[in-house]
C-alpha cells in the first residue's frame, strides 16, 4: 500500500509527521511518500533509522499556515504540500492522502481536484469519538460551514458505510444531534434534516441530545460542521480544564496528592480513552479519494495511528462502498 | 421582596420545589407565592416547618409536562402554573417569577404576556458557567431556536448589563462562539453576527473557540440557542460520562480505590465547581419582567440558589438597566 503524507501540516511539522511516518513504516505494511519542503523533510528523516526504500520525499516548496484562508491557498499556493499531495493521489498509483494541516485548505483542495462522489453534494469530516461503552462516528466536525439539510442525510449514509466496513458494525444506527429528543424539536433546518434522515437513511433512530452523545450507543451521529466542531473542541477544552482545576486542588492538599499518585493509572486510562490521538485521524468523506485529516496538534503516535486508520479504509475499499450506497 | 415560584416545574416537582422554597424563606429575606395544584403543594408544605406568613399558595389546576409542545401549552393550558405565574408577575405586586418547568412553554408565555423590552427582538436564556478561573455568562442556551444575527448582538448587550450589575464586572468583555478565532470564520450567519457585535457592543473581543470557553476569561459569551444548548448539555454529559468511566476503572483496581478515597475531597470540589445547580438558575432576558429558569433536574438547593440569584436581579434593578442599554 502506498500512502501520501503531508509533511508540513500541523503545529509540530515536519518533526512529528516524519517521526510518525518512520514509526508507521516500521510497524505497518506501508510505503510512504512525504510531500513537503525537501531540505527540511530530509533533515528530519536523517534523525531516524528506517528501511530506506519505504519512504520517498517529493518536493513542495510552498507551506500552508494553519490560519491561511483556504481560497487563498487554492489560488496562490499551488505548490504547497496539500495541493501537490492531493494531485499525486489523483494521478493514480497512490492509495490515500493524510494531512494534519489547515482543514479548510485540505477540504477545498480535495473537493476541487478529486471532485465529489456522485450523490454527495459536500464532503464531511467524521471522527470516531469514545463513549462510555464503545465508540461512535460523529460527522461533520468542521468541513462544511454552510450545510443544507440534504448534506446531513448524505453524511448519515456515508457514516453507515464507514462504521459497517471499517468497524464491522452490522446495520449501523444513525442519530441526529438535536436540542430535544422528540421529533419536531429544533429549528426548521433541524426538522428538515430529521425528515430526510427518516426517509432516506436505514437505521435512523431519531434525535440525540448532546448530553447523551457519550452514552447513546448509536453507531453514527450526524450534525452540522459548526455543531460537530463545537462538540469535539468543547470536549477537549473541558477535559483539559477539569484536569487543570483538579491538579490545582491536589497541590493544595497532601492527602489528595497521595490519592492522585495511587490513582495515576486510572486517571491515565481515562485520559487515554478520551484522547482523540489514540484513533489518530478524521476521514474526509464524500470526495473521490481516501483523505484523512490528522489533528493539528498531532504527536508522532497520532500520525502513525492516522496512517493505520487510513490503511483500514483502503483495505475495506470504502470508496466503492460509498459510491454504491449513494447511487 | 415577593417572588412567584412555579411549584409544578421540573422532574421532581412539587417536592423539590417546595423544599427549596422553604429553605429560601428561612435563609433569605423573601416571601414566596407558590403556583400549582393546591392539594399537592399543600401536602408537600405540610412536611416542612417554616414561618407561615412567608409562603402563600395560588391554585393552578393544569400541569405542563416537560415535553408538552409550547404552543399547545399557550392554547390549551391557560390554567397551568407557568401561565398563571407569569400573569401574576404581570399583574404587579410581585418582583419575579421562577420556574424549573418546560423551557419552551416558559419562553412562550413570558414573551406573549410580558412582551419584549423595546430594542430586543427575542428573549435569550443566559447561564453563568464556571471557568478555570472565575465564571462567564453564556447566552443563549436554548430560548431561541431560529435566531437572526441581530439577536446575538442584543444578547451581548443584555449579558453585559447582567455581568456588570449582578456580578460587578466593570466594562464586561463579550465574545462570540465560533469555530475559528480569526474574523471571517464560520458561516454567513456567524460573519454577520460578528460584524454587528463589533459595531454595536462595547467590549467585544472577537471569536471564542469552543475549547477556550473555560479558559477565555471573557465576561460574556454569545451564541445561538442551539449551540448554547449543545455547550451546556454536552458539558454535563461529558463530566457524568467521565465519572462513570473513572468509577469503573477504580473498581477494578484496589490501589486506585484507596487513591480515590484520599482524593474524594478534591473530586467533590471539582464536581461542585462544574455543577450548574450551585448557581441555580438561568435568567430569561429580554422580556418585561424578571424571569428565572431553573434546571429541570433541580434539587432543593438548586431552587434555593435560583431564588437567591433572582433576588440579586431584583436588587440591582436589572430590567431598567437593560431598557436603558437597549434604547
Image (cartoon, coloured by chain):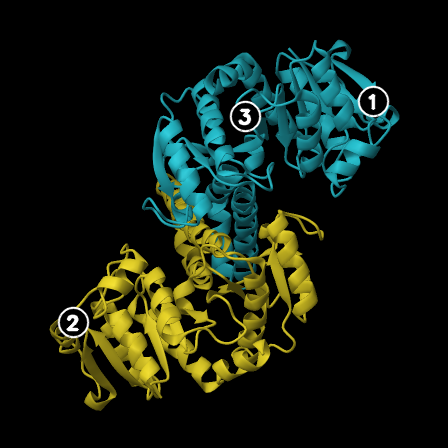
Chain colours: A cyan, B yellow
SS type, badge 1:
loop
- Which numbered circle lies on residue A46? 1
Label 1 CA crowd tier, 10 Å (few <14, some 14–19, many 20+):
few
Q: Which residue is drawn at 35% across and 62% down?
A: B103
Depth check, front residue: B174 or B46: B174
The image position of residue B52, as x and y in percent, is 19, 88
Disc 2 designates what residue?
B37
Instruction: Please tell me if label 2 and label 1 are on a single chain.
Output: no
Instruction: Please tell me if label 3 and label 2 are on a single chain.
Output: no
Q: Measure the C-alpha gap from mark 3 to mark 2.
A: 54 Å
Depth check, front residue: B251 or B98: B98
Q: Measure the C-alpha gap from mark 2 to mark 1.
A: 78 Å
Image vertical order of residue B28 relative to residue A139, above or below = below
Depth check, front residue: A193 or A13: A193
Image vertical order of residue B210 relative to residue B143, above or below = above
Quadrant of residue A281 within the rendered picture: top right
Depth check, front residue: B274 or A5: A5
The image position of residue B239, as x and y in percent, is 44, 51
Question: CB under 8 Å between callouts 2 and 1?
Answer: no
Quadrant of residue B63 within the rendered picture: bottom left
What is the chain letter for disc 3? Answer: A
Q: Measure the C-alpha gap from mark 1 to mark 3.
A: 43 Å
Task: Choose mark 3 or mark 2, whichever is in front.
Answer: 3
Locate residue A93 relative to residue B277 in the image: left or right: right
Instruction: Please tell me if label 1 and label 3 are on a single chain.
Output: yes
Label 3 CA crowd tier, 10 Å (few <14, some 14–19, many 20+):
many
Q: Which residue is drawn at 57% across and 50% down?
A: A237
Where, quadrant-wise, is the N terminus of chain A in this rendering?
top right
What is the chain letter for disc 2? Answer: B
Amino acid at each position: 500500500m502506498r500512502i501520501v503524507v503531508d509533511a508540513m501540516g500541523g503545529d509540530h511539522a515536519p518533526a512529528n509527521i516524519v517521526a510518525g511516518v518512520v514509526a508507521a513504516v516500521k510497524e505497518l505494511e506501508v510505503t510512504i511518500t512525504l510531500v513537503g519542503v525537501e531540505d527540511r523533510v530530509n533533515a528530519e528523516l536523517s534523525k531516524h533509522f528506517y528501511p530506506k526504500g519505504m519512504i520517498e520525499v517529493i518536493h513542495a516548496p510552498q507551506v500552508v499556515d494553519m490560519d491561511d484562508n483556504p481560497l487563498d491557498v487554492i489560488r496562490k499556493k499551488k505548490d504547497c504540500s496539500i495541493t501537490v499531495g492531493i494531485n499525486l493521489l489523483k494521478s493514480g498509483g497512490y492509495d490515500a492522502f493524510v494531512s494534519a494541516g489547515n482543514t479548510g485548505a485540505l477540504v477545498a483542495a480535495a473537493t476541487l481536484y478529486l471532485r465529489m462522489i456522485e450523490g454527495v453534494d459536500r464532503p464531511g469530516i467524521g471522527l470516531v469519538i469514545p463513549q462510555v461503552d464503545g465508540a461512535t462516528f460523529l460527522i461533520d466536525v468542521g468541513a462544511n460551514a454552510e450545510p443544507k439539510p440534504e448534506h446531513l442525510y448524505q453524511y448519515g449514509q456515508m457514516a453507515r458505510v464507514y462504521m459497517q466496513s471499517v468497524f464491522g458494525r452490522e446495520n449501523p444506527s444513525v442519530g441526529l444531534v438535536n436540542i430535544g429528543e422528540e421529533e419536531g424539536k429544533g429549528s426548521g433546518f433541524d426538522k428538515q434534516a430529521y425528515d430526510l434522515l427518516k426517509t432516506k437513511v436505514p437505521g435512523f433512530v431519531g434525535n440525540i441530545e448532546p448530553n447523551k452523545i457519550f452514552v447513546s450507543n448509536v453507531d453514527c451521529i450526524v450534525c452540522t460542521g459548526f455543531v460537530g466542531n463545537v462538540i469535539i473542541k468543547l470536549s477537549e477544552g473541558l477535559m483539559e480544564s477539569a484536569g487543570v482545576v483538579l491538579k490545582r486542588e491536589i497541590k493544595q492538599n497532601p492527602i489528595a496528592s497521595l490519592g492522585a499518585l495511587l490513582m495515576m493509572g486510572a486517571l491515565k486510562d481515562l485520559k487515554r480513552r478520551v484522547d482523540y490521538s489514540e484513533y489518530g485521524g478524521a476521514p474526509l468523506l464524500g470526495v473521490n479519494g481516501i483523505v484523512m485529516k490528522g489533528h493539528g496538534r498531532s504527536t508522532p503516535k497520532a500520525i502513525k495511528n492516522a496512517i493505520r486508520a487510513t490503511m483500514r479504509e483502503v483495505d475495506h475499499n470504502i470508496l466503492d462502498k460509498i459510491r454504491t450506497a449513494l447511487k
